[in-house]
Amino acid sequence: MLAKLTSKNQITLPKSAIEAMGQVSHFDVKVDGGRLVLTPARLGAAEAVQAKLEALGITDQDIVDAIAWARNKR
């Protein structure tokens, strides 16, 4: 199967490839040895993590501070 890259860096995937994946709206994109690898993304999982962080009262700044602290511990 071929997919064409447009001038806007968009790729139209063959209908048969998408149908084989089931209902997918987003893909995680990785480059692996000169190949593009598309993996179906589960957006619900990210939303669940965000909801849990909010329920725990963890803010964006808390995360930034935790990352900075962890990086300085080396």
Image: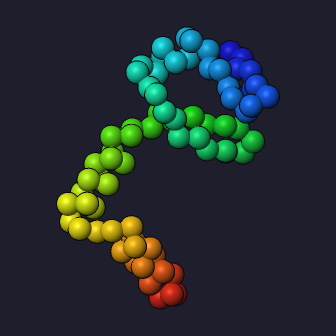
Locate residue 67: give its quadrant: bottom left
Q: Position of residue 27 (x, y in %)?
A: 52, 35
Q: How is the image coloured?
A: rainbow
Q: Nearer the viewer, residue 37 or 61?
A: 61
Q: Residue at x 44, y 84 (%)?
A: 69
Q: Residue at x 48, y 16 (%)?
A: 20
Question: How many numbered dots are placed on residues in this image?
Answer: 0
Q: Residue at x 68, y 15 (%)?
A: 1
Q: Position of residue 65 (x, y in %)?
A: 42, 79
As displayed, is residue 47 above or below residue 41?
A: below
Q: Residue at x 24, y 57 (%)?
A: 52
Q: Position of residue 48 (x, y in %)?
A: 28, 48
As displayed, is residue 58 above or below residue 36?
A: below
Q: Does residue 53 appear in this view?
A: yes
As displayed, is residue 32 above or below residue 59?
A: above
Locate residue 45: give its quadrant: top left
Q: Does residue 70 appear in this view?
A: no
